[in-house]
Image (cartoon, rainbow, N blue to C red):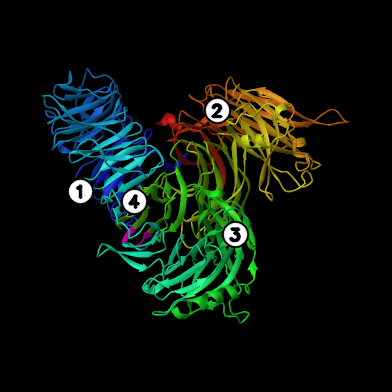
Amino acid sequence: MESVALVAPVTALEFAGDVLLAGTGPEVAAFLLSGGAAAGRRRVLREASVRGLRAEPGGRVAAFGGGWLAVLAVRRGGPGGGGPRLAACGGGAARRLGARVWEARWAAGGRLALALGGGTVALYEWRSGGSWLRSARCGGAGALRCAVLAGAGWGRLALAAGTAAGTVAVWRAAAAETPRRTLPGHRGAVLALSYAEPRGLLASASEDRSVRLWAVGELGGGGEAVCLLVCYGHGSRVAAVGLRGPRPVSAGEDGACLEWDGSGGVRSVRRGHRGALRALALRPAGGCLATGGSDGGARLWRPRKEAPAEAETLGTPERPRAVLLVGPRRVLALGEAGGLAAYEAAAGRWVPLLSPAASCGPRGLLAAAPMCGGAEPLCALGGGDGRLLVFALGGPERAAKLKLFEGPVLGLSWAARPGPSLGPAALLVSGPSGTVLWMDVTCSPGQVPVVQLMGRYRLPPCKQRWHTCATFLPQGGLLLCGDRRGSLLLFPCSRSSSSDGTDRGTSGSEGTASQSEHSCLLHSEAVPLEDPLCVLFGLHGKTGVTSVTCHGDCIYSTGRDGCYRQLRLRDQQLEVLQKHRPCKGLQWIEELRFTPGGDLLVLGFHADNFVVWSTRSGVNLHCVPCGGGHRSWSYYSSPEADAFAYIKRGDVMLYHSEAEPCEQRVLLASLHGREITCVRHLGAVRAPGCHPINVFITGSEDTTACVLTLSELTRAAAPLARLSDHISSVRALALASTTLHNGTQLCSLLFSAGGRAQIECYRLQCAADLGAEGMVSCQVTHMASHRLDEHWDRMKNRHKLVKMDPETRYMSLSVVCGTNSEQLPMPCTFLVAACSDGSVRLFVLLEAAQKLLLVAESFHHQRCVLKVEAFLHTWAEEERKHLLCSAATDGSIAFWDITTALCIDILTKPLLPALGTPLLTVMAHSCGVNSLHIQELPKGRFLVASGSDDGSIHVCLLEVTRGSDEAKPGTCLHILERVVRPCSHAAHVTGIRVLRPDLVLSASVDQRLTLWRLSWDSLEELSTTFFHVPDLAELDCWEVEAGGEQCWYCVLCGQGLELLRCAALDTHCKLQSQGAAQ
């Protein structure tokens, strides 16, 4: 078995010239800082993760971790793209030193000074097979947690080590019996050290969430050390620390990289990783730094000019009601009395544009539309008396004046048209009684704008009945609106204004203003009032829809519920594909902006701050403490600058930030911030002439599921979509109805379940990009969801039942295959769930109705049910029996016949029957069953393999027969053979698969993947492979045949993700154990 791809926490970082090296698991990846050259990647250690990288000026790098050491050479001009390439030095193999390596430092003559476990300092010659030159044991410090070396030559070599007791001890190698000095102060174990020799400064980071800066002078010298700074600001343990000049920089398990100032305060904060930070590196030249995290991500941060701490106060000629940005330094302010003024940045003053008498009066609304070709923006003013003014910003005196309603103008917005905006601008105005007017506005230089009424629309009845946003769909003839009630409405807009030969507009001069108002009211009745074609009522809750936009083939809507939704149009009906919550704490999303570089920016409010959130990097690009979004505000973005204007305490405030190159560069994409608890292989897609690309789904403790690709060529993962509908951890995944079309498209149903008794169902469609090799697109449609607490609230006669525990966790899922239309009233998908409250529950998905219903349950186990597996047996007469296997924490495995439960008319009898009693129960293990797999054999027989917490493996041969009762024949199960291998692994067996009737594959938390030959006398070990995923949670296997050769692939998840390949084996010949060979 060989590893072909790996995603692991980034545990080491080091700059080597213009190359950044990252240690991820046993591998080292190299990235070129300038340009976009592909990363070089090489596996350097065998049974340990890379914990440190130390580069020397000559281009060699020492990589160490655990008790292993390897030396690499960084070379330019790798094959295919000119990226950096890594080559082995000193014989090419990693060496096992026998003791843990805490630190390494290049010494004179190209040798290595090492700090080893137990407090040993040694000088090591790594060339010619490796040899120890000198060593000294440092005493009197206790258990070490980190170390740093300094000094040239053995006589001046000094070691500083952080201890579990919270002190930093310093020795000199030449006299290492006792520490030369001890630095107390930390109240937890010291986890990281950094020493700047020219300045004589030592920085320490600890479990107590603090960073301390010490003035020590020469590290191995005498004298007292002085604590210069004590820095508190991290929310969790500090994992790494470095020094940039006299200031420390630290990375913590709270996901933040903090740069401190000279007084111990936080100077800058960098966030973006999805989990804890594990590694930090500072580049001496250029000011760059790099961070690596437990999410498998690596990021390069370039220096960035500090944004202004406070917004500028502009004042205002009268009390402002609304503000609007029409440029980075150009602000419009609408007063409470109706006056309009513009702020001139060059003069630093306000210039009146319209007096209250010439405007629309009080309670006004303001909106502007940018014009193409650099023309002045078009502005619209709506008044409380139903009047509307439309004018070009350069000539407010030449305004088209219209009387639209007898009541106030409630909604005013410009609607975007698909494609290049060469025609008239579209203006939508809402009035009383839910009427929306669509008007086209054409403006020529020096002329009064021409306003033409194009359509009238009626909003559904509700308390707050006006539109908030609108856009024209690229499909043509359709207008999409969002309203204050949170609904999306689809209207027809194919009728042209000239279809009846009536002039519904106004053009002209100021002298015809009153005639224009009368004409508009008169002719508006000639335009038919349209009702919506489709209504998604209250989609964004009662707080309203804030924006609608089109991008690609999808429609996106945002709202004040903190979510944005992805939709599509089918047969003039809107379908919600997926709901997205970009980040925690974002209560109000105002708008989405798609950048040319492929990033999605989310504009909204986090508490009382306006933020611009980047979904690609996972950080706030801007954060303005404006006091909240309930006041009027406006955001403007251009390649030159970003600006944000808002009203606060009766003044107009302006935040302005010059545009700069992107501060953050993602080198390795982040997967999950916490442990990956489950994984499923969806399939492989392949573009013509390209390598197949495997697609996986993972679930994690961080409450998300991720659709991703894992490439054998790049050995890296690329996330395609993130599913964030769960409110607790995702612990189980199941796939149903997976189909492959033309080898390029995959379609499947995905079920995900976990904490808080929640199940979500999605439809996945993945397709290979025919234009770009290695690229895959993924479309996710949310189908249905189920939560036990919501199910309980809908139940009748609840007082007669035992209340369901809303904190129940779903531990495992299995799809019931082989159901036919004769059994069911409509096409359905059944799902079985293992529950922590001791029950086995059966659900059904009604895809047409988009409902997930609870059908039956049983509390037979009375203990936490860990695993379930559904399987199908077919008699010779095509009679089907749906069977179920469940395993619990007491080591028992139960077998059920659930055929009757699948025949219930679920539409007319919404009862909750029990599954009955099991047909057979087997005590397979002495404790919990953590892995379970069933393989079908001929003649109604099945192989059932299971692994347990006690490290044992149990395999039995199950036979399915008919019952002896001829009047009412049932199903009988018999155990024909069984084999038990106690202590097959040194820890929990969390993954097991039957590959063939004579081959079983098992994986354990002991990080061993073992292949067994199965006979009913014993389980014989064929091979054992060490894998690099700690805390293994689950595995998935599938068979591949290529070029006439058969092989299996296996994916493992836990603290990372690893893909391994196993070639076909001749089980008649016992293979040498790989572990024994090592």
Give the Cα separation between the discs numbered 2 and 1: 58 Å
Q: For this rendering, which residue is in front, 794 or 879?
A: 794
718 magenta-colored: no
- Percent from the top left, x then y, of residue 453? 55, 73
Residue 1016 seen in the current view:
yes
- First of labels 4, 1 by sequence position: 1
Give the Cα separation between the discs numbered 1 and 3: 56 Å
Q: Which residue is mark 2?
A: 1020
Residue 127 relative to residue 553: left or right: left
How packed mark 3 is, by other alpha carbons closer than 10 Å (few <14, some 14-19, many 20 or more), is: many
- First of labels 1, 3 by sequence position: 1
Residue 1043 seen in the current view:
no
- First of labels 4, 2 by sequence position: 4
How packed mark 4 is, by other alpha carbons closer than 10 Å (few <14, some 14-19, many 20 or more), is: some
Q: Residue at x 66, y 35 (%)?
A: 793
Q: Which mark is residue 665?
A: 4
Residue 66 relative to residue 5: left or right: left
Q: Secondary structure at mark 3?
A: strand
Q: Secondary structure at mark 2?
A: strand
Going by the numbered disc 1, the residue's amino acid type is: Ala
Q: From which residue to which does the magenta span run? A: 636-642
Seen in the picture, residue 480 relative to 209 is either above or below; the reply is below
Q: Which residue is mark 1?
A: 285
Q: Which residue is mark 3?
A: 489
